[in-house]
Image: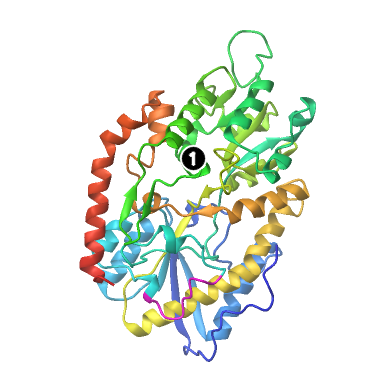
Protein backbone atom coordinates (compact mmCIF):
# COMPACT_ATOMS: atom_id res chain seq x y z
CA UNK A 1 0.00 0.00 0.00
CA UNK A 2 1.46 3.37 -0.97
CA UNK A 3 0.22 6.94 -0.65
CA UNK A 4 -0.51 9.03 -3.72
CA UNK A 5 2.73 10.98 -4.38
CA UNK A 6 1.16 14.22 -5.63
CA UNK A 7 -0.90 14.92 -2.50
CA UNK A 8 0.54 17.29 0.11
CA UNK A 9 -0.67 18.73 3.39
CA UNK A 10 -0.39 22.29 2.02
CA UNK A 11 1.49 23.56 5.06
CA UNK A 12 4.16 26.06 4.06
CA UNK A 13 6.14 28.91 5.60
CA UNK A 14 6.02 27.88 9.26
CA UNK A 15 9.01 28.29 11.60
CA UNK A 16 8.17 27.82 15.27
CA UNK A 17 11.61 28.75 16.58
CA UNK A 18 12.40 25.47 18.31
CA UNK A 19 9.13 25.29 20.27
CA UNK A 20 8.54 22.07 22.21
CA UNK A 21 5.79 19.77 20.92
CA UNK A 22 4.96 17.42 23.75
CA UNK A 23 2.57 14.54 23.03
CA UNK A 24 1.23 12.30 25.81
CA UNK A 25 0.38 8.65 25.16
CA UNK A 26 0.62 5.17 26.67
CA UNK A 27 2.82 2.39 25.31
CA UNK A 28 0.79 -0.16 27.26
CA UNK A 29 -2.34 0.35 25.18
CA UNK A 30 -0.95 -1.18 21.97
CA UNK A 31 2.19 -2.98 23.06
CA UNK A 32 5.77 -2.75 21.76
CA UNK A 33 5.06 -3.72 18.15
CA UNK A 34 3.43 -0.41 17.21
CA UNK A 35 5.74 2.51 18.18
CA UNK A 36 4.71 6.17 18.21
CA UNK A 37 8.20 7.21 19.19
CA UNK A 38 11.63 5.91 18.24
CA UNK A 39 14.73 6.94 20.17
CA UNK A 40 17.12 6.01 17.37
CA UNK A 41 17.46 4.11 14.12
CA UNK A 42 17.86 0.39 14.82
CA UNK A 43 17.33 -1.29 11.46
CA UNK A 44 13.68 -2.22 12.09
CA UNK A 45 11.54 -0.90 9.24
CA UNK A 46 8.67 0.45 11.33
CA UNK A 47 10.89 1.90 14.07
CA UNK A 48 13.12 3.66 11.55
CA UNK A 49 10.17 5.03 9.56
CA UNK A 50 8.66 6.50 12.73
CA UNK A 51 12.04 8.00 13.64
CA UNK A 52 12.35 9.56 10.18
CA UNK A 53 8.78 10.91 10.34
CA UNK A 54 9.36 12.66 13.65
CA UNK A 55 12.71 14.07 12.50
CA UNK A 56 11.26 15.32 9.23
CA UNK A 57 8.47 17.21 10.99
CA UNK A 58 10.94 18.65 13.51
CA UNK A 59 13.28 19.95 10.81
CA UNK A 60 10.49 21.15 8.55
CA UNK A 61 8.81 23.32 11.19
CA UNK A 62 11.69 23.93 13.60
CA UNK A 63 10.06 22.22 16.58
CA UNK A 64 11.22 19.78 19.24
CA UNK A 65 8.88 16.76 19.35
CA UNK A 66 8.70 14.51 22.39
CA UNK A 67 6.37 11.61 23.08
CA UNK A 68 5.68 11.20 26.79
CA UNK A 69 4.61 7.75 27.92
CA UNK A 70 2.38 7.72 31.01
CA UNK A 71 1.67 3.98 30.80
CA UNK A 72 -1.53 2.20 31.71
CA UNK A 73 -4.58 1.12 29.76
CA UNK A 74 -7.23 3.28 31.36
CA UNK A 75 -7.61 6.92 32.32
CA UNK A 76 -3.93 7.88 32.41
CA UNK A 77 -3.77 10.02 29.26
CA UNK A 78 -6.98 12.02 29.94
CA UNK A 79 -5.78 12.60 33.51
CA UNK A 80 -2.46 13.94 32.26
CA UNK A 81 -4.23 16.28 29.84
CA UNK A 82 -6.63 17.45 32.55
CA UNK A 83 -3.75 18.26 34.92
CA UNK A 84 -2.01 20.12 32.12
CA UNK A 85 -5.04 22.34 31.53
CA UNK A 86 -5.81 22.93 35.22
CA UNK A 87 -2.22 23.82 36.05
CA UNK A 88 -2.05 26.24 33.16
CA UNK A 89 1.41 25.04 32.19
CA UNK A 90 0.37 23.60 28.81
CA UNK A 91 2.45 20.49 29.36
CA UNK A 92 0.99 18.64 26.39
CA UNK A 93 0.02 19.90 22.95
CA UNK A 94 -2.23 16.89 22.39
CA UNK A 95 -2.78 13.32 23.55
CA UNK A 96 -3.32 9.85 22.11
CA UNK A 97 -5.86 8.17 24.37
CA UNK A 98 -7.73 4.92 24.75
CA UNK A 99 -11.37 5.10 23.75
CA UNK A 100 -14.22 5.72 26.23
CA UNK A 101 -12.02 6.98 29.04
CA UNK A 102 -13.21 10.26 30.61
CA UNK A 103 -14.07 11.92 27.31
CA UNK A 104 -17.52 13.09 28.52
CA UNK A 105 -16.06 14.62 31.69
CA UNK A 106 -13.30 16.36 29.73
CA UNK A 107 -15.99 17.81 27.46
CA UNK A 108 -18.23 18.97 30.32
CA UNK A 109 -15.22 20.60 32.00
CA UNK A 110 -14.39 22.46 28.80
CA UNK A 111 -10.98 20.86 28.43
CA UNK A 112 -11.12 19.70 24.80
CA UNK A 113 -10.74 21.76 21.65
CA UNK A 114 -13.26 21.35 18.85
CA UNK A 115 -11.44 19.76 15.88
CA UNK A 116 -13.69 21.70 13.54
CA UNK A 117 -12.17 24.91 14.92
CA UNK A 118 -8.49 23.92 14.94
CA UNK A 119 -6.58 25.95 12.33
CA UNK A 120 -4.80 24.02 9.55
CA UNK A 121 -6.65 20.76 10.27
CA UNK A 122 -8.50 19.60 7.16
CA UNK A 123 -10.71 16.65 8.05
CA UNK A 124 -11.50 16.00 4.39
CA UNK A 125 -7.95 14.84 3.75
CA UNK A 126 -7.38 11.08 3.38
CA UNK A 127 -5.22 10.91 6.50
CA UNK A 128 -8.31 11.57 8.66
CA UNK A 129 -10.83 8.76 9.22
CA UNK A 130 -13.78 9.48 6.95
CA UNK A 131 -16.46 8.48 9.49
CA UNK A 132 -15.55 10.90 12.28
CA UNK A 133 -17.64 13.80 10.97
CA UNK A 134 -20.66 11.54 10.46
CA UNK A 135 -20.46 9.49 13.65
CA UNK A 136 -18.62 11.46 16.35
CA UNK A 137 -20.03 14.97 16.09
CA UNK A 138 -22.06 16.35 19.02
CA UNK A 139 -24.22 19.25 17.92
CA UNK A 140 -21.77 20.83 15.50
CA UNK A 141 -18.77 20.06 17.69
CA UNK A 142 -16.13 17.38 17.15
CA UNK A 143 -14.22 16.95 20.43
CA UNK A 144 -12.27 13.85 19.31
CA UNK A 145 -10.81 12.59 16.05
CA UNK A 146 -8.76 9.83 14.45
CA UNK A 147 -5.97 10.29 11.92
CA UNK A 148 -3.28 8.16 10.32
CA UNK A 149 -1.05 8.97 13.30
CA UNK A 150 -3.19 6.48 15.25
CA UNK A 151 -2.35 2.80 14.90
CA UNK A 152 -5.85 1.60 14.06
CA UNK A 153 -6.51 -2.07 14.58
CA UNK A 154 -9.49 -4.01 13.32
CA UNK A 155 -11.50 -7.10 14.16
CA UNK A 156 -11.01 -9.87 11.63
CA UNK A 157 -11.67 -13.55 11.11
CA UNK A 158 -8.49 -15.63 11.01
CA UNK A 159 -8.88 -18.62 8.68
CA UNK A 160 -7.14 -21.99 8.96
CA UNK A 161 -6.29 -22.49 5.30
CA UNK A 162 -5.38 -26.16 5.67
CA UNK A 163 -8.81 -27.01 7.05
CA UNK A 164 -10.50 -25.14 4.22
CA UNK A 165 -8.63 -27.35 1.78
CA UNK A 166 -9.05 -30.61 3.73
CA UNK A 167 -12.83 -30.22 3.98
CA UNK A 168 -13.18 -28.84 0.45
CA UNK A 169 -14.94 -25.75 1.77
CA UNK A 170 -15.66 -22.56 -0.11
CA UNK A 171 -12.73 -20.17 -0.01
CA UNK A 172 -13.49 -17.26 2.36
CA UNK A 173 -11.41 -14.98 0.11
CA UNK A 174 -13.75 -15.70 -2.80
CA UNK A 175 -16.79 -15.29 -0.58
CA UNK A 176 -15.50 -11.90 0.54
CA UNK A 177 -14.82 -10.69 -2.99
CA UNK A 178 -18.26 -11.95 -4.08
CA UNK A 179 -19.98 -10.21 -1.15
CA UNK A 180 -21.35 -13.55 0.06
CA UNK A 181 -19.28 -13.77 3.26
CA UNK A 182 -22.04 -13.66 5.90
CA UNK A 183 -22.50 -14.86 9.48
CA UNK A 184 -24.89 -17.51 8.18
CA UNK A 185 -22.17 -18.80 5.84
CA UNK A 186 -19.56 -18.81 8.62
CA UNK A 187 -21.84 -20.82 10.92
CA UNK A 188 -22.63 -23.27 8.13
CA UNK A 189 -18.94 -23.90 7.44
CA UNK A 190 -18.10 -24.07 11.15
CA UNK A 191 -20.65 -26.86 11.62
CA UNK A 192 -18.97 -28.99 8.98
CA UNK A 193 -15.59 -29.28 10.69
CA UNK A 194 -16.48 -29.56 14.41
CA UNK A 195 -15.57 -32.98 15.78
CA UNK A 196 -15.08 -34.78 19.09
CA UNK A 197 -11.72 -36.17 17.97
CA UNK A 198 -10.95 -38.32 21.01
CA UNK A 199 -14.53 -39.55 21.31
CA UNK A 200 -14.88 -38.84 25.04
CA UNK A 201 -18.08 -36.84 24.60
CA UNK A 202 -16.52 -33.68 26.04
CA UNK A 203 -15.32 -30.88 23.77
CA UNK A 204 -11.97 -29.48 24.91
CA UNK A 205 -8.97 -27.86 23.24
CA UNK A 206 -7.90 -31.33 22.09
CA UNK A 207 -10.97 -31.57 19.85
CA UNK A 208 -11.83 -29.69 16.68
CA UNK A 209 -14.00 -26.58 16.38
CA UNK A 210 -15.36 -24.46 13.59
CA UNK A 211 -15.09 -21.13 15.40
CA UNK A 212 -13.47 -19.51 18.39
CA UNK A 213 -14.34 -16.25 20.07
CA UNK A 214 -12.23 -14.64 22.80
CA UNK A 215 -14.02 -15.31 26.04
CA UNK A 216 -10.89 -13.82 27.62
CA UNK A 217 -11.69 -10.49 25.89
CA UNK A 218 -15.48 -10.40 25.71
CA UNK A 219 -15.56 -6.77 24.57
CA UNK A 220 -14.71 -8.03 21.09
CA UNK A 221 -18.18 -9.53 20.90
CA UNK A 222 -19.52 -5.97 20.68
CA UNK A 223 -18.21 -5.79 17.13
CA UNK A 224 -20.93 -8.21 16.07
CA UNK A 225 -23.25 -5.20 15.91
CA UNK A 226 -21.07 -3.27 13.46
CA UNK A 227 -20.28 -6.22 11.22
CA UNK A 228 -24.04 -6.68 10.78
CA UNK A 229 -24.30 -3.15 9.42
CA UNK A 230 -25.45 -1.35 12.59
CA UNK A 231 -24.05 1.17 15.07
CA UNK A 232 -24.77 1.44 18.80
CA UNK A 233 -25.52 5.13 18.42
CA UNK A 234 -25.28 7.82 15.77
CA UNK A 235 -25.85 11.59 15.73
CA UNK A 236 -29.00 12.78 13.98
CA UNK A 237 -29.13 15.76 11.59
CA UNK A 238 -28.72 18.11 14.57
CA UNK A 239 -25.84 16.19 16.07
CA UNK A 240 -28.03 14.71 18.80
CA UNK A 241 -27.09 11.10 19.67
CA UNK A 242 -29.71 8.47 18.86
CA UNK A 243 -29.33 5.05 20.47
CA UNK A 244 -29.87 1.75 18.70
CA UNK A 245 -33.41 0.37 19.00
CA UNK A 246 -34.99 -3.02 18.53
CA UNK A 247 -35.31 -4.16 14.91
CA UNK A 248 -35.61 -7.39 12.98
CA UNK A 249 -32.00 -6.99 11.91
CA UNK A 250 -30.73 -6.61 15.47
CA UNK A 251 -32.87 -9.47 16.77
CA UNK A 252 -31.84 -11.82 13.97
CA UNK A 253 -28.17 -10.97 14.40
CA UNK A 254 -28.30 -11.83 18.09
CA UNK A 255 -30.19 -15.07 17.51
CA UNK A 256 -27.72 -16.17 14.87
CA UNK A 257 -24.82 -15.42 17.19
CA UNK A 258 -26.46 -17.33 20.03
CA UNK A 259 -26.83 -20.32 17.73
CA UNK A 260 -23.19 -20.07 16.68
CA UNK A 261 -21.97 -19.97 20.28
CA UNK A 262 -24.23 -22.46 22.00
CA UNK A 263 -26.16 -24.71 19.61
CA UNK A 264 -24.03 -27.75 18.90
CA UNK A 265 -20.32 -27.86 19.69
CA UNK A 266 -18.93 -25.76 16.89
CA UNK A 267 -17.51 -22.92 19.01
CA UNK A 268 -14.53 -22.82 21.34
CA UNK A 269 -14.92 -19.93 23.77
CA UNK A 270 -11.50 -18.90 24.99
CA UNK A 271 -10.76 -19.87 28.64
CA UNK A 272 -14.38 -20.92 29.13
CA UNK A 273 -14.52 -24.03 26.98
CA UNK A 274 -11.07 -24.98 28.22
CA UNK A 275 -8.01 -23.36 29.78
CA UNK A 276 -6.60 -21.88 26.57
CA UNK A 277 -7.23 -18.41 25.25
CA UNK A 278 -8.59 -18.15 21.72
CA UNK A 279 -5.23 -17.38 20.09
CA UNK A 280 -3.50 -20.33 21.76
CA UNK A 281 -6.37 -22.62 20.83
CA UNK A 282 -6.29 -21.49 17.20
CA UNK A 283 -2.52 -22.00 17.14
CA UNK A 284 -3.02 -25.71 17.85
CA UNK A 285 -4.43 -26.04 14.33
CA UNK A 286 -7.84 -27.45 15.22
CA UNK A 287 -10.03 -24.39 14.76
CA UNK A 288 -11.31 -23.21 11.39
CA UNK A 289 -12.24 -19.59 12.16
CA UNK A 290 -11.04 -17.24 14.92
CA UNK A 291 -12.48 -13.84 15.74
CA UNK A 292 -9.66 -11.63 16.97
CA UNK A 293 -8.03 -8.31 16.20
CA UNK A 294 -5.07 -7.49 13.97
CA UNK A 295 -3.14 -6.73 17.17
CA UNK A 296 -2.81 -10.51 17.55
CA UNK A 297 -0.75 -10.87 14.35
CA UNK A 298 2.59 -10.74 16.21
CA UNK A 299 1.37 -13.48 18.60
CA UNK A 300 0.80 -15.74 15.60
CA UNK A 301 4.14 -15.08 13.99
CA UNK A 302 5.65 -18.44 14.95
CA UNK A 303 2.61 -20.68 14.58
CA UNK A 304 2.76 -23.57 12.13
CA UNK A 305 -0.86 -22.96 11.14
CA UNK A 306 -1.21 -21.62 7.61
CA UNK A 307 -3.72 -18.86 8.10
CA UNK A 308 -5.23 -15.91 6.32
CA UNK A 309 -7.57 -13.13 7.37
CA UNK A 310 -10.93 -11.90 6.10
CA UNK A 311 -13.33 -9.22 7.40
CA UNK A 312 -15.97 -9.97 9.97
CA UNK A 313 -18.94 -11.34 7.99
CA UNK A 314 -21.91 -9.26 6.84
CA UNK A 315 -25.52 -9.64 7.95
CA UNK A 316 -26.54 -10.68 4.44
CA UNK A 317 -25.50 -10.25 0.83
CA UNK A 318 -27.60 -7.10 0.50
CA UNK A 319 -25.49 -5.27 3.10
CA UNK A 320 -23.59 -2.58 1.23
CA UNK A 321 -20.13 -3.11 2.73
CA UNK A 322 -18.12 -4.98 5.34
CA UNK A 323 -17.81 -3.03 8.57
CA UNK A 324 -15.47 -3.18 11.53
CA UNK A 325 -15.53 -0.80 14.45
CA UNK A 326 -12.51 1.44 14.89
CA UNK A 327 -11.88 0.84 18.56
CA UNK A 328 -8.20 1.57 19.02
CA UNK A 329 -7.39 5.13 20.14
CA UNK A 330 -8.34 8.80 19.85
CA UNK A 331 -6.70 12.17 19.45
CA UNK A 332 -7.50 14.69 22.20
CA UNK A 333 -6.45 18.35 22.03
CA UNK A 334 -6.61 20.30 25.31
CA UNK A 335 -7.94 23.84 25.32
CA UNK A 336 -5.26 26.48 24.94
CA UNK A 337 -4.63 30.00 23.61
CA UNK A 338 -4.91 30.72 19.90
CA UNK A 339 -1.19 30.53 19.24
CA UNK A 340 -0.85 27.11 20.89
CA UNK A 341 -3.97 25.79 19.16
CA UNK A 342 -2.55 26.89 15.81
CA UNK A 343 0.68 25.04 16.57
CA UNK A 344 -1.38 21.99 17.49
CA UNK A 345 -3.20 22.22 14.16
CA UNK A 346 0.00 22.32 12.14
CA UNK A 347 1.45 19.40 14.09
CA UNK A 348 -1.71 17.29 13.91
CA UNK A 349 -2.04 17.80 10.16
CA UNK A 350 1.63 17.37 9.28
CA UNK A 351 2.29 14.32 11.48
CA UNK A 352 -0.90 12.68 10.22
CA UNK A 353 0.13 13.40 6.63
CA UNK A 354 3.64 12.00 7.11
CA UNK A 355 2.16 8.96 8.86
CA UNK A 356 -0.26 8.37 5.99
CA UNK A 357 2.49 8.85 3.43
CA UNK A 358 5.26 6.78 5.04
CA UNK A 359 4.36 5.05 8.31
CA UNK A 360 1.14 3.38 7.14
CA UNK A 361 2.93 1.81 4.14
CA UNK A 362 5.69 0.69 6.52
CA UNK A 363 3.06 -0.99 8.71
CA UNK A 364 1.87 -2.93 5.66
CA UNK A 365 5.43 -3.89 4.75
CA UNK A 366 6.15 -4.89 8.34
CA UNK A 367 3.10 -7.13 8.46
CA UNK A 368 3.35 -8.63 5.02
CA UNK A 369 7.06 -8.98 4.33
CA UNK A 370 6.94 -12.62 5.46
CA UNK A 371 6.65 -11.44 9.04
CA UNK A 372 3.06 -12.06 10.08
CA UNK A 373 0.67 -12.81 7.22
CA UNK A 374 1.50 -15.55 4.78
CA UNK A 375 0.01 -14.75 1.38
CA UNK A 376 -0.69 -11.90 -1.02
CA UNK A 377 -4.45 -12.25 -0.78
CA UNK A 378 -4.31 -11.69 2.97
CA UNK A 379 -2.52 -8.44 2.14
CA UNK A 380 -5.47 -7.41 -0.03
CA UNK A 381 -7.89 -8.47 2.68
CA UNK A 382 -6.03 -6.38 5.25
CA UNK A 383 -6.38 -3.29 3.07
CA UNK A 384 -10.09 -4.01 2.58
CA UNK A 385 -10.54 -4.42 6.34
CA UNK A 386 -8.71 -1.20 7.23
CA UNK A 387 -10.81 0.70 4.69
CA UNK A 388 -13.97 -0.59 6.39
CA UNK A 389 -13.23 0.89 9.83
CA UNK A 390 -16.00 3.07 11.26
CA UNK A 391 -16.28 5.07 14.47
CA UNK A 392 -19.21 4.54 16.82
CA UNK A 393 -20.66 7.35 18.96
CA UNK A 394 -21.58 5.07 21.86
CA UNK A 395 -18.22 3.34 21.97
CA UNK A 396 -16.32 6.62 22.13
CA UNK A 397 -18.64 8.62 24.39
CA UNK A 398 -20.41 5.91 26.37
CA UNK A 399 -17.66 5.12 28.90
CA UNK A 400 -18.32 1.40 28.57
CA UNK A 401 -22.05 1.58 29.33
CA UNK A 402 -24.48 -1.35 29.26
CA UNK A 403 -25.38 -0.88 25.61
CA UNK A 404 -21.70 -1.25 24.68
CA UNK A 405 -21.74 -4.80 26.04
CA UNK A 406 -25.18 -5.96 24.96
CA UNK A 407 -23.72 -8.92 23.07
CA UNK A 408 -21.37 -10.13 25.78
CA UNK A 409 -23.78 -9.51 28.67
CA UNK A 410 -26.98 -10.72 27.05
CA UNK A 411 -26.00 -13.48 24.61
CA UNK A 412 -22.74 -14.69 26.12
CA UNK A 413 -23.38 -13.91 29.79
CA UNK A 414 -27.10 -14.61 30.16
CA UNK A 415 -27.48 -16.97 27.19
CA UNK A 416 -30.49 -14.96 26.15
CA UNK A 417 -31.68 -13.24 22.98
CA UNK A 418 -34.33 -11.08 24.63
CA UNK A 419 -32.97 -7.92 23.05
CA UNK A 420 -36.13 -5.87 23.61
CA UNK A 421 -36.06 -6.37 27.38
CA UNK A 422 -32.34 -5.63 27.60
CA UNK A 423 -32.76 -2.36 25.71
CA UNK A 424 -35.84 -1.40 27.70
CA UNK A 425 -33.93 -1.93 30.94
CA UNK A 426 -30.66 -0.22 29.99
CA UNK A 427 -31.39 2.37 27.31
CA UNK A 428 -33.00 5.04 29.53
CA UNK A 429 -29.84 5.55 31.61
CA UNK A 430 -27.67 5.77 28.50
CA UNK A 431 -30.06 8.17 26.80
CA UNK A 432 -30.06 10.36 29.92
CA UNK A 433 -26.25 10.42 29.91
CA UNK A 434 -26.21 11.37 26.22
CA UNK A 435 -28.76 14.12 26.87
CA UNK A 436 -26.46 15.57 29.51
CA UNK A 437 -23.47 15.26 27.18
CA UNK A 438 -25.31 17.14 24.46
CA UNK A 439 -26.37 19.87 26.90
CA UNK A 440 -22.80 20.15 28.19
CA UNK A 441 -21.53 20.66 24.65
CA UNK A 442 -24.07 23.42 24.02
CA UNK A 443 -23.19 25.08 27.33
CA UNK A 444 -19.43 24.84 26.86
CA UNK A 445 -19.02 25.36 23.14
CA UNK A 446 -22.22 27.26 22.34
CA UNK A 447 -24.72 26.44 19.60
CA UNK A 448 -22.31 26.47 16.70
Residue 118 colored in magenta in the image: yes
Q: Is residue 113 left or right of residue 129?
A: left
In the image, residue 35 lies in the stretch drawn in magenta: no
According to the image, what is the colour scheme of the structure? rainbow
Q: Nearer the viewer, residue 118 or 44?
A: 118
- Which of the pair 326/185 is nearer the observer? 185
Which residue is depicted at the point 39% across and 24% down? 416
**Residue 23: where, in percent of width, then height?**
44, 69
Quarter location, residue 404: top left
Residue underneath mark 1: 220
Mark 1 is surrounded, within 10 Å at the Cα level, by few (under 14), some (14 to 19) or many (20 or more) other residues, namely many
Quadrant in which the C terminus is drawn: bottom left
Q: Kindly give the residue lying farthest to the top in the view shown.
A: 200
Answer whether residue 69 is visible to the viewer in this image.
Answer: no
From the image, give the main secondary structure of the stretch colored magenta: loop
Query: Does any portion of residue 81 appear in the rendered image?
Result: yes
358 lies above or below 135: below
Specify the quadrant that holds the N terminus: bottom right
In the image, what residue occupies the spot 69% across and 14% down? 197
The residue segment tinted magenta is 117-125
> Residue 130: horizontal and vertical position, in percent?
51, 63
Looking at the picture, does residue 82 appear above or below residue 57? above
Name the secondary structure under disc 1: helix
- Left/right placement of residue 89 relative to residue 159 reads left
Amino acid sequence: MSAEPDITDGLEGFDFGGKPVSIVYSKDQLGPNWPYDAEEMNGDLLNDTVWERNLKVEERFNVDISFNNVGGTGNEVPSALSKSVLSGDGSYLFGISHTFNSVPSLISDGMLTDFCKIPYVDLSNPWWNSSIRDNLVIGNVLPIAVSSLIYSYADVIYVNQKMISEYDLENPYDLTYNNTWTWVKLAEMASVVSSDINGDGIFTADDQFGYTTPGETVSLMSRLIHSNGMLFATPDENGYPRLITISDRLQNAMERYYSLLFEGDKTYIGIKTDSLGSVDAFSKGRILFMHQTTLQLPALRNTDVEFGIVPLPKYDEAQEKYMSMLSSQLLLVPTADDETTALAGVMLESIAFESWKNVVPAVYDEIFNQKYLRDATSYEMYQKIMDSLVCDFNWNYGNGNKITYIVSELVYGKKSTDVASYLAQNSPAVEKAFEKLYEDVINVYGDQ
